[in-house]
Every structure is written in structure tokens, then in C-alpha cells.
Amino acid sequence: MMDTALLADRQAKARHWFEDLQMQLISAIETIEREASGPFADEAKEPGRFELTQWSRTNHDGAPGGGGRMAMLHGRVFEKMGAHTSTVFGTFAPEFAKQIPGTDQDPNFWASGFSVIAHPWNPNVPTVHMNTRFVVTSKAWFGGGADLTPVLDRRRVQEDEDAQAFHAAMQGTCARHANVADYPRYKNWCDEYFHLKHRNEPRGIGGIFYDYLNSGNDAQNSNWDEDFAFTKDVGSTFVKIYDSIVRSNLTTPWTQQDRHEQEVRRGRYVEFNLLYDRGTIFGLRTGGNVDSILSSMPPRVRWP
């Protein structure tokens, strides 16, 4: 078992980082909203600002179970964007506990993380998702990743400059932490995870995905500092590369046919999140904030 004081210190550091990263992301996105020469849609003529909402959770046995800070934006660049932190704790319900590592004998858990989902107005600006987290049961690990989802077929190719820039950013992050991060494995993991099995098609162009990261492979998480440094770099790099991608596409012209294609592609996003997404399933099964969990859903969507 890990020393209690050491574990508490690590939990505090992780939570502080996720909450700080949320504010970094908010600052970057609100700057884009202010500097954009919009409007880019009749419905949104003013720069968007995030609305922050605190929420609390009750464990399934009625005890306090933590909570989080929900941040939602509806603007002139982003039709809808959520950037949420949460720190939750308690016990897993028996039917769910057996699915989580380290809960076979002890159902207690603690989890803290930050998640982002962006749905821009301009179909040339890709949808994006990022999540990083630290989870503690009788074991402890980091998980997360980032993936890019262009919504126009002509942009959903690996040769597109956005895809190349995004992959280069994620590969660079892994290279800076080569002792703990395996880029080829994390890239393949992302491709396999963000795949719509019922349609046999990828959700987007990929990125990286990792889970159960305890590179020391021991009860003390002896490489925790390195694992944490990598997870922090994933978040910081994501903010920078997505800021760049948004700005490079912001004024690219688009048509109503592009908008139609965007909304159809968003339907695929809904299908994945409701059928396969671990974060959605984890949040709903642990009594999380439903509005926060389902804020990943696109604001406008269609099925042809």
C-alpha cells in the first residue's frame, strides 16, 4: 500500500493541475473569441465567455462524493464548448466495481480530471476532444489523451495539414517523455478506441490515448512524477496546438452543404459517446453531473 500522506499529496497536486489547466484553456479560447473578426453565424454576434458552474455529487450510499466545476461557452467561433473539471470519490456500486482495476476487494475510489469538447461553427475548424485524469482505487494510474475530428470528408485525411500538425504535436509530447510514453502504442490505442464498431469507421483522424499509466508498475507508483509530467504536457500541448489549428481555419469560407455535412458527422459523435465512451459511462454510473457529462453532445445534429 502507498503511504497515505504521499498519496494525499499526489491527489492534491493532480487536482490543482487539472483545475489550473481548465483556466489556461478558458483564457486561450476566450482570447480567440475576442480577437475573431466575426460574427461567424447569425446566432452569435458577440464574443463568447465561459459560464462556470460548481456542482456537487452524492455517493450512491448517500454520503458526500465530491464534485466539480463545469465551464460552458456558446460563442461566435464555437457554437458550443465544454471544459470541465471534477474530483469525485466514494465507493463503486457492486455491479460496476468489478469493471475497474483495484476494486476486486475494496470498492473505494477517488478520481480527478479535466475534459474538453469543442464544436465550432465553421465546418473547416475540426471538432476536438481532450481528457486527462488521475484515478485511485487500491491501485493508482493516469489516463487520457486527445483526438481530432474533422467534420468534412475532404479534411478527414491524414495528409491534411491539421491532421499532420496535431499528430506532430502529440508525437512531440511523447518524445519529450520517452521513458514513460510510447507514441506508436498510444497512437494505435487511439485509433482502436475512437472507432465506431457498428459503422466500421473511425471517429476522426486520431491522436493519442492511454490508460492505466503506472510506468513504475508497482504499488508505490515509483515513476509517478514522470507519469504526471507527461500527463501535464499532454494538456499544455493540446491547448497550444488546438489554438493554432482554430486560428488557421477561422476565416476559411464554408457553404450550407458544408454545414449539412458537419451536422451529419456530429451524429457519429453522438453515437460514439453514448455507445462506447468510457468517460460517459463512468460518469453516469458513478452519479456524476449529467449536464456536465452530456455536454459533449453537439448542439445541432442530423441523421440523413
Image (cartoon, rainbow, N blue to C red):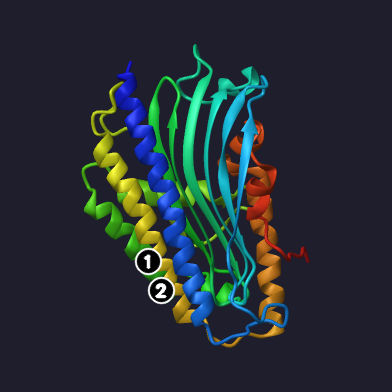
- The residue drawn where x is 29% and y is 26% is 6
The picture quadrant where one finds residue 179 is top left
Q: Amino acid at mark 1?
A: Lys
Label 1–label 2 contact, CB within 8 A = yes
Q: Position of residue 180 (x, y in %)?
A: 26, 41
The quarter in which the C terminus is drawn is bottom right
How far apart are the two marked residues, 1 and 2, measured between alpha carbons?
Answer: 6 Å
The picture quadrant where one finds residue 203 is bottom right
Q: Nearer the viewer, residue 88 or 170?
A: 88
Q: Nearer the viewer, residue 234 or 24?
A: 24
Q: Position of residue 93 (x, y in %)?
A: 63, 21
**Viewed as shown, does residue 10 lie left or right of 57?**
left
- The residue drawn where x is 48% and y is 29% is 110
Q: Nearer the viewer, residue 208 or 48?
A: 48
Residue 117: which numbered mark, if any? none
Q: Amino acid at mark 2?
A: Ser
Residue 24 in the image: above or below residue 99: below
**Viewed as shown, does residue 30 lie left or right of 16?**
right
Residue indicated by mark 2: 244
Residue indicated by mark 1: 240
- The residue drawn where x is 45% and y is 66% is 27
- The residue drawn where x is 37% and y is 70% is 165
- Number of marks in the rendered image: 2
- Mark 1, residues whose alpha carbon is within 10 Å: few (<14), some, or many (≥20)? few
Q: Position of residue 285 (x, y in %)?
A: 65, 32
The picture quadrant where one finds residue 300 is bottom right
Q: Secondary structure under badge 1?
A: helix
